[in-house]
C-alpha cells in the first residue's frame, strides 16, 4: 500500500477523528493513539511530505484525496475484521487488537477473498 504500518494507523486515526470531531489537531491524534506529541509531529511531517495530509495555518490537519483513499481502505478493513472476529466468538478487545494487526498485512487478494466468503455466508457470521 506504499506507506508503513504506523503511517496507515495515523491516517485511519485522522479519518476517525475528522468524522467524529470535524476538526483534527495533533493533540487529538496523540490522545486517540496514546502517543506523544513529538511522535505525532514526526509522523505528520512524513505524511505531509508524502502528500497524504495537509495542515493549515491554524494547525488543523486534513486528509488529501490520496490520504482519504488509504485511510478509508484501512478503516474498512479494521471494521470488517473486527466484526468478523467477534462473530467467531473473539472478545471485542482482542478482536480490535488483532484486526489492527491483520488490516496491514493481508494482501488485497486475501482480504477480498475473506470478505467475499463472509458476505456469501453472512448468516453464519453476522
Image: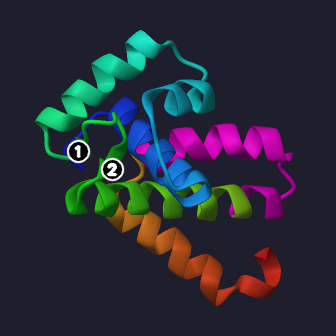
Front one among 91 and 76: 76
Residue 63, position as x, y percentages in the image: 31, 52
Local crowd size for mark 1, using a 10 Å CA cut-off: few (<14), some (14–19), many (≥20): some
Judged left or right of residue 50, residue 55 is right
* Position above or below: 12 against 45: below
Front one among 120 and 95: 95
Judged left or right of residue 120, residue 111 is left
Q: Are marks 2 and 1 in contact (CB under 8 Å)?
A: yes
Local crowd size for mark 2, using a 10 Å CA cut-off: few (<14), some (14–19), many (≥20): many
As drawn, the label of residue 54 is: 1
Residue 35, position as x, y percentages in the image: 53, 17
* Position above or below: 75 against 4: below
Total residue callouts: 2
> Which residue is disc 2 drawn over?
62
Residue 31, position as x, y percentages in the image: 61, 26
Majority SS type along the magenta span = helix
Judged left or right of residue 51, residue 22 is right
The residue segment tinted magenta is 84-104
Q: Secondary structure at mark 2?
A: strand
Residue pictured at 22% horizontal, 47% vertical: 52
Residue 93 colored in magenta in the image = yes
Q: Secondary structure at mark 1?
A: strand
Residue pictured at 24% horizontal, 39% vertical: 3
Calculate the distance from the C-alpha at mark 2 to the C-alpha at mark 1. Answer: 5 Å
Residue 50 colored in magenta in the image = no
Mark before the other along the chain sequence, 2 or 1: 1
Quadrant into which the C terminus falls? bottom right
Amino acid at each position: 500500500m506504499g506507506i508503513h504500518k504506523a503511517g496507515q494507523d495515523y491516517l485511519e486515526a485522522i479519518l476517525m477523528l475528522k468524522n467524529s470531531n470535524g476538526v483534527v489537531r495533533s493533540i487529538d491524534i496523540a490522545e486517540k493513539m496514546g502517543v506523544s506529541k513529538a511522535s505525532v509531529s514526526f509522523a505528520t511531517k512524513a505524511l505531509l511530505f508524502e502528500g497524504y495530509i495537509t495542515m493549515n495555518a491554524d494547525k488543523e490537519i486534513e486528509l488529501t484525496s490520496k490520504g482519504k483513499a488509504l485511510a478509508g481502505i484501512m478503516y474498512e478493513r479494521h471494521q470488517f475484521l473486527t466484526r468478523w472476529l467477534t462473530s467467531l466468538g473473539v472478545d471485542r478487545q482482542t478482536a480490535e487488537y488483532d484486526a489492527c494487526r491483520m488490516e496491514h498485512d493481508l494482501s488485497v487478494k486475501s482480504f477480498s477473498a475473506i470478505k467475499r466468503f463472509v458476505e456469501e455466508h453472512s448468516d453464519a457470521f453476522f
